[in-house]
Image (cartoon, rainbow, N blue to C red):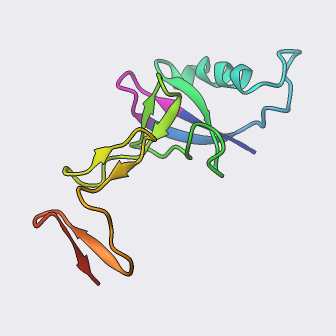
Amino acid sequence: MAHYAFIDSNNIVVKVIVGVDETVTQNGDGGSSEAWEQFYQNQSWHQGLTCKRTSYNNQIRKQYAGVGFTYDADADVFVRPQPFPSWTLDANHDWQPPTPKPEGDYSWNEAELEWVAI
């Protein structure tokens, strides 16, 4: 099974569906992710949205897309929503806290901008 994310004009994922695996061909259109992306994108129920393949096991476009994720077209990756306002996006498209998480069980306290032991 393949998964496809539908992206609005703001590059936000608004829907993810289970679709046809790219190895399946349709009417001689070939069996590529791009062919199926185009097929789904052209369906009347997805007009105005861009379709991109995503991978449940994080092997395509960095990570599995979820509703609310952003699609970075330049890097061709899906980016998780920012977990806290103080966190910044690194070069690998991962959110990083202002200070590294210590070893052990900690949760982030945004009000104090620090890790708190659980």
Q: Position of residue 98 (x, y in %)?
A: 23, 56
Q: Position of residue 58 (x, y in %)?
A: 62, 48
| Residue occupying the point 59% across, 21% down | 41
Q: Is residue 92 left or right of residue 18?
A: left
The residue range painted magenta reads 6-13
Please state which of residues 115 and 70 is positioned toward the viewer in this rendering. Answer: 115
Taking 22 as reference, is 107 above or below it? below
| Residue occupying the point 73% across, 20% down | 35
Q: Is residue 109 left or right of residue 4?
A: left
Please state which of residues 18 and 87 is positioned toward the viewer in this rendering. Answer: 87
Q: Residue furthest bottom?
A: 118
Q: Residue furthest left?
A: 111
Image quadrant where residue 26 sits: top right
| Residue occupying the point 19% across, 51% down | 86
For the image shown, how many numbered marks are present on the structure?
0
Image quadrant where residue 105 sits: bottom left
| Residue occupying the point 31% across, 63% down | 100
User: Which quarter of the rendered picture does the N terminus lie within?
Assistant: top right
Q: Position of residue 40 (x, y in %)?
A: 64, 25
Residue 12 falls inside the magenta stretch: yes
Taking 62 as reference, is 36 above or below it? above
Please state which of residues 15 and 33 is positioned toward the viewer in this rendering. Answer: 33
Q: Is residue 21 left or right of residue 18?
A: right
Q: Position of residue 81 (x, y in %)?
A: 35, 46
Classified by dominant secondary structure, the portion drawn in magenta counts as: loop
Q: Residue furthest right?
A: 28
Taking 67 as reference, is 73 above or below it? above
Residue 110 falls inside the magenta stretch: no
User: Which quarter of the rendered picture does the C terminus lie within?
Assistant: bottom left
